[in-house]
Amino acid sequence: MVPVAEGDRGGAQPVSSLPPEFDPEHLGDVIGSLGYRAVSALNKGAQAAGCYHNSGEGGVSPYHRLGADVIWQLGAGYFGARDADGRFSLDRFAGAIEECPQVRAVEIKLSQGAKPGKGGILPGAKVTPEIAEIRGIPVGEDCLSPNAHPEFRTVDELMDFIERIADRTGLPVGIKSAIGQLEFWNELAERMVERNEGPDFISIDGAEGGTGAAPLTFADHVALPFKIGFQRVYPIFQQAGLSKDITWIGSGKLGFPDRAIVALTMGFDVIQVAREAMLAMDASRRRSATRVTVPPGWRPRTPGSRPD
């Protein structure tokens, strides 16, 4: 199970009681930008390594169900959990969770280090019938991810959304965000104290985080670097007496040993890795997720191209 603090929901294992062999790491990439072979390899690799597999915002596919525990990431497109109008459907989401016992937690993606404040696009050429079914979108049409969640606009509405999902699924629910101004974080900590509710875990995504869907201006110049962002956010929750009740997850080029050690000694409980696994598949060097010229087996396949 995803490690969270004592007393949290979902029967999750507290960080303080994790066994010595626990690997505080998980992999994360998205179906659609990655093809079935790549996602399958990541899932099997996560199982072999004893870590978690983050679905990314594209939803949970059959290739996320090959053995590893999964964190279902909910982006503003609510892929795999949306109704015919593109709105979040709690009934559909809860039903999908019931059909996929590998899902151990839910991560609400507020923003991403590589492109905070921007949405995303999956070109129609990559929206195969299978991807369309997984995401709940039309085949062959550009798939747009909004830059903000239509389900909430305020901190209280975000917390209500978290509690709705947690109450229905029984799973730990957290948030992922890049770091910029601190007003949101101050208000979140204040309301968590007042309501005794809120996210079970917080994923801090540094500006070093990458995605081929990010405009260069945003990738290079927006959001705080990982270390600075965490150093500004963590004390807010520490002063509110909440820091030990939250599981902290870090991401942004943390897959190499020296950076992972620094993150863990700074106070993170878990680190996320994506780029390093993609490099092993010759994916990150392709620069743009909007192109369709990527290595065979890595890209989403066209109909009929999958071997028996």
Image: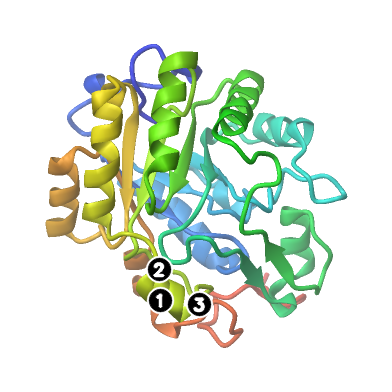
Q: Tell whether label 1 touches label 2 (CB within 8 Å).
A: yes
Q: What residue would you read off at disc 2?
A: 210
Residue type at mark 1 is: Ser
Residue 8, image x, y percentages: 43, 16
Residue 268, by quadrant, is: top left
Give the secondary structure at mark 1.
helix
Query: Dot 2 lies on which element?
Result: loop
Q: CA distance from mark 2 to mark 1?
A: 9 Å
| Residue appearing at x 52%, y 58% in the figure | 40
Please name which of the two marks, 2 or 3, marks the residue nearer to the observer.
3
Residue 119 vs residue 61, the one in the foreground: 119
According to the picture, the residue beneath numbered tag 3 turns out to be: 215
The answer to which of marks 1 and 3 sits earlier in the sequence is 3
| Residue 72 appears left or right of 264 | right
Sequence-first tag of 2 and 1: 2
Quadrant for the C terminus in the image? bottom right
Q: Residue at x 36, y 21 (%)?
A: 13
Residue pushed farthest front? 183
- Identify the residue at horizontal 19%, vertical 52% (top origin): 260
Q: Which one is nearer the viewer's eye here, 75 or 28?
A: 75
On residue 284, the disc is 1
Q: Secondary structure at mark 3?
A: loop
Q: Is residue 74 left or right of residue 176?
A: right
Position of residue 177 measured from the top left corner of the image (x, y, whole percent): 44, 49
Looking at the rendered structure, the kind of residue marked 2 is: Gly
